[in-house]
Amino acid sequence: MDGWTDFFFQGCSLKVIKLFRDLPRDPEFREFQESQSWQLGRRASDNMPPGHDILVLWMTARKGKSRTQYAAKTFADFPRERAEARIRTSGLKNHSVEEVQKQLDPFWLESRAFEHVMRCCSNSQKIYFPRYFGVLKRIQRQDYPLSYLLRPRAIVLEAIKPELASRRVLAANSPTANRSKSYEAFSQALDQMALSDFERCWYRSLFSDRFRRLLVLHDIGATHGDVRDDHFRLPGDFYDTVLYDFSSSYTFYPTWPCIRRPKPLSAMTSNEQNILLEILLDRAEQCDLRHYFARSLQLSPQVVEGLCSQTINSEIANLELIVLKVMVRPDEFSMPSLASILPFLEAIRPENKSTWHISRARLLQYYDSAWVLYPRHKEVGEMTLVSLSEKAFLDTDTLPVDDQHTFFLLLFPRSWDIGEAVHRLMAACSDLILSGKQGSVLSRAQFDNL
C-alpha cells in the first residue's frame, strides 16, 4: 500500500481495504438508459436557491405506454478556473488542475458514492439510500427547463417523497448499532431527560435506524460528508425516508485528497457518528416527538405526555391484526423498528380512534410478524409467504430493490395461534390489494371469518 492508503485505512479491517483493491480506480458511471425518452420538470424542493450549482428537478421517463417519475439531481460544470483558484489558496502544488477538478466536483463525488454503494452493498443495505439509476452527462439547453440556468449533468435517483411509498421499514434489532459507544452514550443521556418510556424507546430506535445507515457507508470505506437532520428526512417531513445527498461525500481514492488536513477513515467516521449523536440529543431535548403528536392531533403537549405514559394494559386483550403495504423491501424480514413503523401506523389509524397509532406503537412488544411478497401486475393469488415469526421461507438476500414487487407486513398478536391460519394471513393481503388502501386493521372475529 502507498502512503495515503496506509494513512486513510489505519486501524481499519482488511475487509474494507480489500474492497478497494478489487475495484477499478476510475469506474465508468453508468448512463441512465431506463426509457426511450425523458423530460425534466419543476423543482423538487424550494430549499435550494435558484442560482445554486445544484438543482433537483422532477423527471418523467417514458417507456412505451408506461411513465416513471424520478428525481434528477442536476449539477453545473466545475470550471477549471475554480480548481486553479483552489490550488493557489490551499497550497495544493502537487495536484494537477484536472485532479482538483475531479476531487472537488460534487457531481463526481456523489456519482462515485452511489456507484460504490451499488457495487459493495447487499440488497438489504441498498434500501437505506435512494435508488440510483445512472447519470446524464450532456443535457442540452432545449432539454432543460428554460426558467432555470442550465446544469448540464444529472444523477437520476428514486423520486423520494414524504409518503409511505418512499419510507423504509427497518428491523427492530440492530446489534451492531445497539452495541456502539455512541448508542450507549445516547441512551444514558436520554435517561436523564424528562421523557416518557415510550419517547425514550422511540428516540433510541431512531438513533439505531440512522446509525446503521451511516455504518453501512463507513463499512465500505465511504463517508457522507454532510450529516444533518434533513439529510435523513425531507424538508418539512417529521419521519425519516432515506439517507441522501452525497455531494460532499468521500469515497476512497488512491491519491492524496485535495484538502489541507486530511484525516483517516476512523476519525472521519467517528466525527460523523458524534454529529448524529448531537443531532438526536438536541431533538430529544426539544421533545419534538411529543410536540409533533400535539400538532397533528390538536392536543396539548401535556395531554400527549399522558398518552405516552398512561397504563394501557387493558388493551392487550383486544389487539388487532395490522396489515401494511410496503413498497420497498425491508432490510430484514422481521419485526419492524419502532421509529420506522410509526408513520405506517399513523397513516392507517381508524377514523374514530385518533390516538390508536400511539397505543399500538407502545404495544409492539405484544406483536409478532409475517412478511408476504406480491409481484405487481400479477394475479392477486400469486403471493408468497416470505417469513413468519422471523423464520424465513425464501432466500431473502436475493429479493431485489425494485418497483416490480410489493411487500406486506402483517403484525398479529402473539397470543393468536397462527400456525393453522396462515391462509387467513394471505387472504388479508388479498383483501388489502383489492381495496387499494395502504393498510387495514382486523379484529379477531374479522380475521376468523376470512
Image (tube, grey):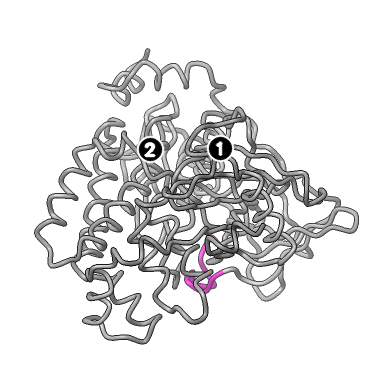
The structure residue drawn at horizontal position 53% and vertical position 40%, both measured from the top left corner, is 126
Residue 397 drawn in magenta: no
Q: Nearer the viewer, residue 324 or 292?
A: 324
Query: Quadrant location of the N terminus?
Result: top left
Q: Is residue 305 visible?
A: yes
Q: Is residue 55 visible?
A: no
Against 93, residue 83 (above or below) is below
**In the structure shown, which secondary structural element does the residue marked by tag 2 occupy?**
loop
Q: Nearer the viewer, residue 189 or 138?
A: 189
Q: Nearer the viewer, residue 243 or 106?
A: 243
Q: Quadrant of residue 211?
A: top left
Q: Nearer the viewer, residue 88 or 338?
A: 338
Question: Which numbered disc, 1 or 2, marks the residue closer to the eye?
Answer: 1
Label 1 and label 2: CA atoms lie apart by: 48 Å
Q: Which residue is mark 2?
A: 258
Q: What secondary structure is the magenta-colored segment mainly?
A: loop
Residue 54 drawn in magenta: yes
Position in image of residue 106 (x %, y %) = 50, 49
Q: Quadrant of residue 195?
A: bottom left
Against 191, residue 175 (above or below) is above
The structure residue drawn at horizontal position 49% and vertical position 43%, both measured from the top left corner, is 109
Is the C-beta separation of discs 1 and 2 under 8 Å? no
Q: Which residue is mark 1?
A: 387
Q: Is residue 136 left or right of residue 317?
A: right
Report the amino acid beneath label 1.
Ser
The structure residue drawn at horizontal position 57% and vertical position 30%, both measured from the top left corner, is 397
Circle on res. 136: none
Image: magenta residue range: 45-55
